[in-house]
Amino acid sequence: MLNEPYKLEAINLDVYYGQVKAIRNATLQFLPNKVHALIGPSGCGKSTFLRIFNRMNDLIKAARIAGRVLLDGQDVYAKNMDVTELRRKVGMVFQKSNPFPKTIYENVAYGLRINGSMANKAELDARVEQSLKDAALWDEVKAVLHKNALELSGGQQQRLCIARALAIKPEILLMDEPASALDPISTGKIEELIYELKQRYTIVIVTHNMQQAARISDFTGFFLLGELVEYGKTAEIFTQPQDKRTEGYITGRFG
Amino acid sequence: MSTKYGKLARHIGEFVIEKMIFLSGLITIAMVGLIFLFLLKESSSLFDTVTLAEFLGGTHWYPISDPPQFGVVALLTGSAWVTLGAMVIAMPLGIACAVYIAEVAPPFVREYLKLTVELLAAIPSVVFGFVGIVTIVPLVRSIFGLPTGLTGMAGSMVLAFMAMPTLVSIAEDSIRAVPSTYKEASLALGATEWQTLMRVIVPAASPGIAAAVMLALGRVIGETMAVMMVTGNAAVIPSGLLQPMRTLTATIAAEMGETVHHSDHYFALFAIGALLFLITFVINCLSNLFVTNVKKS
Amino acid sequence: MKFKTKLSRLSPNTVQKIAFAGLLAATSLVLLPVLLLMAVLIGKGVTALSWTFLTDIPRDGMRSGGIYPVIVGTCWLVGGTIAIALPLGVAAAIYLTEYARRNFLTWTIKLAIVNLAGVPSIVYGLFGLGLFVMLLRCGVSMLSGSLTLAILVLPIIITSSQEALASVPQSYREASLALGATRWQTIWHCVLPNALPGIMTGAILAIGRAAGETAPILFTAAAFYLPHLPNSVFDPVMALPYHLYVIATQIPNIGQDIRYATALVLVAMVLGMSFFAIIIRWHYRKKRC
């Protein structure tokens, strides 16, 4: 696509659940500091696909893959790959916000504490504050840092989850329909946030909302029934799709 | 460098912890296996001097006479009588109680009733025995005009109460687990709640109720202290519930303290233990079968 | 026949009324005696209950004095039991919910737990006698008793911990793993803290059960009469349930009030534990909603 080195790429990727082939022969690349949207009707394998990149699919015993996934040119599924190290580099935000039932502060500090990377409290405080600022949540919660995170509103909870993911300084952010359960105002905030975050991260976002993909992404991939139908610059996908099926989906004939 | 060492330590630590967790899972099975092996090993020594047929078919339990006799028929019959009596009392009452709590009682009463059942479950066996001695034993004596109230009947009555928590709570759970659509369908056809209960809900919950009965049965057969305290402990073959009798469990509890370790008597008591283990094992497997059947359907 | 025709002539609503009254009668017959029992124990036991009774050693062949060493012995026995059973049981539960795959081994472990729960308590006593007292040469001692009771309460702890662990939402585990936590870190920092109330409830129920059991300690730990506290874990120990058995059946001419008071102390200890567990459960259930 471009001559820049790819941050993350999938090459001839197949994903199986037991005997069922969930993803067929997908090849695509993600670039640094760009937002990549994966769109398609629900149940077409987008979320499955996303979880390939930080190996969250390892949790599903029946799942297995064929093909290659490369992070900075290194095979993510290599034998010597440290999965926890990988997941620290490839952060993830889930469809349904899932803060721990701990305080706001402890939620953000969780990833730092388990790594033991923060030597002192001041350093930890600073990182928590920075992460909450990066997630555009700081002003709303700075007075209530030690309140239970479950008392926040849905939109705030989701931004907290983003802050939690940012705190461990990932290089890539995978977002699985991060705004699907939110009201329009919260969705707007998350979208603004994604625009800000792409200055520093490689972002891959799964969404079934085409307008959202068009608004925030630089590249778009269209999935249908486990097949990557088309992948390219967002402007091109939405104005002059190459494939009839993409055109059908975008113009609202199905999905 | 230091982070690399830290990481290595973490990996090793994690490996050790995971293996230890796995080990404790294995210990649990090992325990069941060990219990059975132990009972078998200790009781097998008995069969050097006594045949299995003499043990299971012998009608005389005279462990300290010369020569000793180790026939468990009297004890088996005692256990059977007491258990049968307890189940005859416990089953109708317990199931009725479960139905009432699950379907009839108003919600605020239900919570208190369930709490009382839990209370019943928590009372130690020896307290049941003590209260049995001071209340049920004299009651049985005066009602039936007997020389002593320490009889199988007293044991059955005490055991019936002790079986209640298991019976009621599991039966109640399975009645509550019947989908409410069944109930609605029946009520919509103009059936009364009682008709719905008897013809739809209870039949639908019957595998769970059967499991509850089996588990209660296991509890009753294995119960020791309360039974020993109220049944009179005569090791003769009883012909009815109104006689003193002795169960398998009470025999072990009463005699083990006075045996010479590794004597035939000692081994004979282990053989009774093995017999008890087998009986309860079969009952447990059966009730487990009922429970899995419920889950499948 | 006549009865049946008469019954069928009754309207369904009347039948229902009669039937429900019958159910209520059955329920009362089952549950009222429990309340009666409690009332009698409290009514008759309280009169003999005094500070001396709780803090003095038994005197005159246990016909007077107090039950101090008995109470303390029970506490030690039960403390030892929990110290052994809790780590083992929680670890087994973690294995089953967090690590185990669906295979033959897991199936065997689950079957073992179900059956362990159904083994009669006197059989645990035999096992403890054979393994701990005789083979491992721990003698009739607190250690043997605690080990035996630990196996007895293991199924309670494992099943309640399993339920507690399984009720922690999967999304917590995913969030933690996605942040680069290892499996064990996820369990330790995220799953266990959330399962703690459930595990605690199970542990407390186990304490209550262990405190009330007699048959397993009959020949593994219990001392008939020991006017002082044990010096080490290798000493036998007096325990409340066994003591109640002894004074209720083995010692003639003992004041009824001492028997009632001992029973009351035992029941208070055991029920106190159960109520504590119930309160914890209610508290967290309310919080979760």
Image: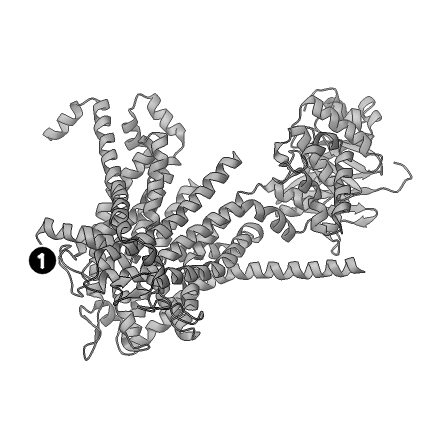
Is A254 left or right of B24, judged from the image as shown? Answer: right
Figure check: B274 above or below B187: below
Image coords of residue B272 (percent x, y) = 29, 66
Image coords of residue B230 (percent x, y) = 21, 57
- Disc 1 secondary structure class: loop
Is C108 left or right of A251, judged from the image as shown? Answer: left
Say which residue label 1 marks: B147
Figure check: B243 above or below C175: below
Q: Residue shown at 73%/40% (left/top)?
A: A165
The answer to whether residue B278 is seen in the rendering is no
Q: Which chain does tag 1 point to?
A: B
The residue under label 1 is which amino acid type?
Pro
The image quadrant where one finds the C terminus of chain A is top right
The image quadrant where one finds the N terminus of chain A is top right
Query: How dense is the environment of label 1, judged by Cα within 10 Å: few (below 14), some, or many (20 and up)?
Result: few
Quarter of the image where one finds residue C118: bottom left
